[in-house]
Amino acid sequence: MISITKKIRGFSVSTQDAAAPAPKATAEGFVHEADRRLMLRDVPKPLADSLRWEKRPVLTAGNPSQTYTVTVPDSLTRSGSRTWWVIVGHVWNDVPGRGYPFEVFVTGEAPRGLSALCKSLSMDLRSNDRGWLKAKLESLAKAKDVAFDYVMPDGVTYRMPSEVACFAKLVLHRCTELGVFTEEKLASTPILDARMFKKEPKGSSNGTLAWNQSVLHPVLGDDFELFLKEGLLPDGQRRPFSLWLSGTYPKSLDGLCKVLSFDLSVSDLAWGVRKLKQLVDVQEPQGEFMAQMPGSDKSAWYPSTVAYIATLVLHRLHQLGWINAQYDVPSSNVVQLSLIPGGSEAPKPTVKTVQGSLCWECGAHAVVKLDGCPTCTQCSASRC
């Protein structure tokens, strides 16, 4: 029996299985709960396709190009001056002196990772969206490392914040010379308009969560954490949209992270996946190393640090259900992914699985017997 000893002044109805109120998002786009994620609202739909050439055009008569020399002074290298070259290839248009750049590459003693950046940026050069290309190059031109003075082709000396910035300003200069950034060509920007945001959202004082992985290259000395910032879409699905590194690595890789973050911010993920698949077989001198396969306790050989970074990001997209195990996504409206006869667009590197026991030093399953001694093929630790 229930006894009432005081006057009832009000009441409320509740049930034990009533759902707890959903956490409210702040003006900064954050949900204030233990698992904080950025909220990505009003995600635009992708527009018409934007590639003039899906791959590098085959020009039987060759093509013209412009070459620029970059010399890094002794005071920066501490081991003598270092010289490398930036080469921008193009085809001429009907207007005299105007052309269509379609590729960029570097040669000589260029910073590590810059060749991979060129590979990714060449696809942007083959795009019809000139606003997208201009925004990327202007962002790269702000990349910071060790600053140095450089005389641009117009004869003016500029203070370059980094070698990556110098590279970007040279490509910008050549594109401007070829008439790439006219008002008419900047009028239509389908890829730029398809970004999920105009400026990358930043975290509040409450912080936010990101996915991270450790990367160790024992030969070249890379030892850093890879971070993928993720946001919540209106349907509640997680979406990676920005890539950053922290630790010991060549600062030129920050430029690659900048452009890949641009690509991942396009609402149609097929664009970003296409860029990542370009990089899974990138090689560099003495760059092959063994690392743990994503989603496995086994190890495999990867041709470079860049290739492993691309593989890790693709693995995370697969984890979240955005792509399948073959790293494929449905055909998009931003870029048409046509089939390439005889194989996939970007084959994965050959994987050499190591069947070994757990290493007491680095934790990789890569300990085998060499000359009778238990030796780790990952970090070279030995019991003998």
Image (cartoon, rainbow, N blue to C red):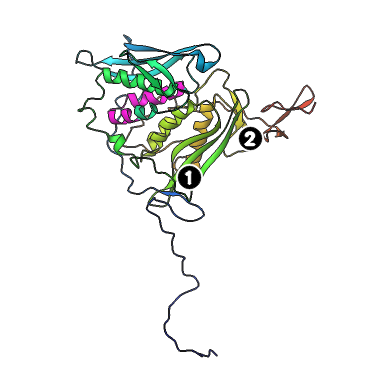
Q: Which label sits on residue 320?
A: 1
Start and end of the magenta stretch? 114-135
Front-most of 111 and 116? 111
Residue 167 position in % (x across, y down) = 40, 20
Circles 2 and 1 in contact, beta carbons < 8 Å: no
Residue 102 position in % (x across, y down) = 33, 20
Label 2, label 1: how far apart the Cα atoms are:
21 Å
Q: Which label sits on residue 298?
A: 2
Residue 320 position in % (x across, y down) = 48, 45
On screen, 177 above or below 8? above
Of all residues, the one furthest to the top in this rendering is 61
Seen at 48% across and 40% down, the residue is 228
Residue 273 position in % (x across, y down) = 42, 34
Disc 1, SS: loop
Front-most of 148 and 36? 148
Considering the image in quadrants, where does the N terminus appear?
A: bottom right
Disc 2, SS: loop
